[in-house]
């Protein structure tokens, strides 16, 4: 690997910002283990070659609160190899997918490996602070703020409106960061401060693979929430790398591999940060090699065979995975079998096929009844169905509608969590599925 950054000058403290590994992630029912293994090998080599002093991981190490043993082993093997081959420190915070208790359980052992873990919000903001390096003159303070759950930032009250919940959430989150900034200033070290976070900044670009982390998305904050005393804010949760709210020093590193087909065209990266003379000197993008391409093919039913026969998949370390979306499918036909027949012998793997009708609510004319339209349309998301149902309810006030949508989001989140757990148990039971041969 050739060097990707300027020569590291004396007195420079070099950091890599990463997030959203989602170890143990399945796409449909297929494992991502090989891709994660390649990424971690790339990351280890990068840290070695670029003389990185600290790795900051901004949450969602794992894809679930009960990750498979293979994911746990991959995480701990990486940390031990990093300790054995480098002098790099690690700061880890929990994301909304992680179990804070599980991340923090081996804390005493991880401390000996130069790994500091903050899984849940402590009683005092000063307990969030990690001074680096720990065995020399301080060069950086990390305010390691983890994913903040509702109970960390507000006290729920019966009968609150969505607007009141949102105000309490944002106010509580802001207070945590203000307290952390004040605690860091109280150290009187005159070194830069890097803050972490696992949350949604309003206006940022999302993808299909992210779960709402506060009911109804009410916990979204503005980029101006973060104090100017933070030299850099390392964010996790959104899977597309980007500056948040137009602030170049408030950034999502994004996930290291595409976690859904909506991320198929995203360029994945790490952020390499140089701190010198009490400030952020450089912030550079380090592209992550793509090991497996994800491609979504969209076509009409009449064009399906030609689309499949002519598709030339991009080359990667592993075979391309394909999702096929077919407009106006014929009722009753088995689209998956048809697509698999067309793809037989191809250099790619079709892992999902879905049909969608283009005639629907958006094209409703005045003489069509809503009931007929809904009956003859395919709505992709339960929330779309619920919104249609609300549209048909006479006399529903905007306040009541907002309250019902908030309750629906909460119930949907609980349902999705249950399904995720069932999928994980099933995957652990059948073992790793080999699709690379």
Image (cartoon, grey):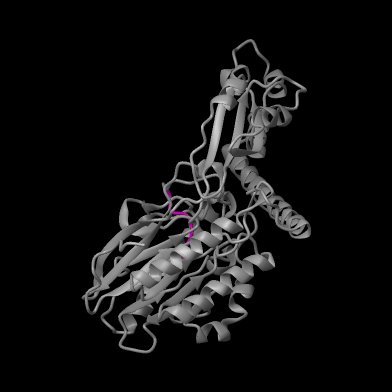
Between residue 236 and residue 398, name the one nearer to us. 236
Instruction: Identify the magenta region.
Output: 197-202
Between residue 377 and residue 166, name the one nearer to us. 377
x and y, in percent, of residue 281 in the image? 23, 67
> In the rendered image, which quarter contains the N terminus?
bottom left
x and y, in percent, of residue 243 in the image? 35, 53
Q: Is residue 133 above or below residue 346?
A: below
Residue 1 located within the stretch drawn in magenta: no
Between residue 360 and residue 241, name the one nearer to us. 241
The residue drawn where x is 57% and y is 86% is 108
x and y, in percent, of residue 166 in the image? 51, 54
Q: Is residue 198 above or below residue 416?
A: below
Q: Is residue 185 above or below residue 430?
A: below
- Specify whether 105 is left or right of 177: right
Residue 360 appears in view: no
Residue 161 appears in view: yes
Residue 199 located within the stretch drawn in magenta: yes
Q: Quadrant of residue 339?
A: top right
């Amino acid at each position: 690997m050739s060097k990707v950054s300027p020569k590291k000058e004396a007195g420079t403290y070099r950091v890599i910002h990463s997030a959203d590994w989602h170890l143990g992630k399945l796409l449909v029912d297929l494992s991502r283990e090989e891709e994660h293994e390649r990424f971690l090998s790339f990351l280890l080599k990068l840290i070695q070659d670029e003389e990185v002093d600290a790795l900051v991981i901004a949450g969602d190490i794992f894809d679930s609160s009960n990750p498979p043993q293979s994911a746990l082993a991959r995480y701990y093997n990486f940390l031990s190899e990093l300790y054995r081959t480098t002098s790099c420190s690690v700061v880890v915070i929990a994301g909304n997918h992680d179990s804070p208790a599980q991340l923090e359980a081996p804390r005493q052992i991880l401390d000996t490996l130069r790994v500091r873990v903050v899984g849940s919000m402590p009683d005092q903001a000063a307990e969030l602070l990690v001074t680096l390096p720990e065995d020399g003159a301080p060069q950086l303070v990390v305010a390691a703020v983890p994913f903040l759950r509702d109970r960390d930032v507000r006290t729920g009250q019966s009968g609150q409106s969505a607007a009141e919940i949102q105000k309490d959430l944002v106010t509580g989150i802001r207070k945590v960061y203000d307290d952390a900034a004040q605690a860091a200033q109280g150290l009187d070290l005159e070194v830069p401060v890097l803050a972490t976070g696992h949350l949604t900044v309003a206006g940022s670009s999302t993808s299909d693979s992210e779960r709402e982390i506060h009911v109804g998305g009410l916990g979204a904050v503005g980029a101006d929430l973060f104090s100017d005393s933070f030299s850099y804010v390392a964010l996790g949760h959104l899977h597309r790398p980007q500056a948040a709210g137009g602030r170049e020093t408030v950034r999502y590193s994004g996930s290291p591999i595409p976690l859904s087909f909506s991320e198929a065209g995203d360029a994945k990266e790490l952020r390499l940060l140089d701190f010198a003379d009490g400030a952020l000197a450089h912030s550079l993008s380090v592209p992550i090699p793509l090991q497996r391409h994800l491609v979504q093919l969209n076509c009409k039913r009449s064009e399906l065979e030609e689309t499949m026969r002519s598709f030339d998949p991009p080359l990667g370390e592993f075979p391309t995975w394909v999702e096929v979306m077919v407009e106006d499918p014929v009722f009753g036909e088995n689209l998956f079998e048809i697509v698999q027949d067309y793809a037989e012998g191809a250099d790619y793997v079709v892992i999902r096929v879905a049909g969608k009708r283009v005639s629907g609510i958006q094209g409703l004319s005045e003489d069509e009844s809503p009931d007929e339209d809904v009956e003859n349309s395919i709505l992709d998301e339960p929330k779309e169905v619920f919104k249609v149902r609300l549209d048909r309810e006479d006399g529903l006030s905007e306040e009541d509608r907002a309250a019902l949508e908030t309750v629906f989001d909460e119930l949907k989140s609980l349902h999705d969590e249950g399904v995720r757990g069932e999928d994980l148990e099933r995957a652990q039971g059948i073992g790793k599925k080999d699709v690379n041969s």
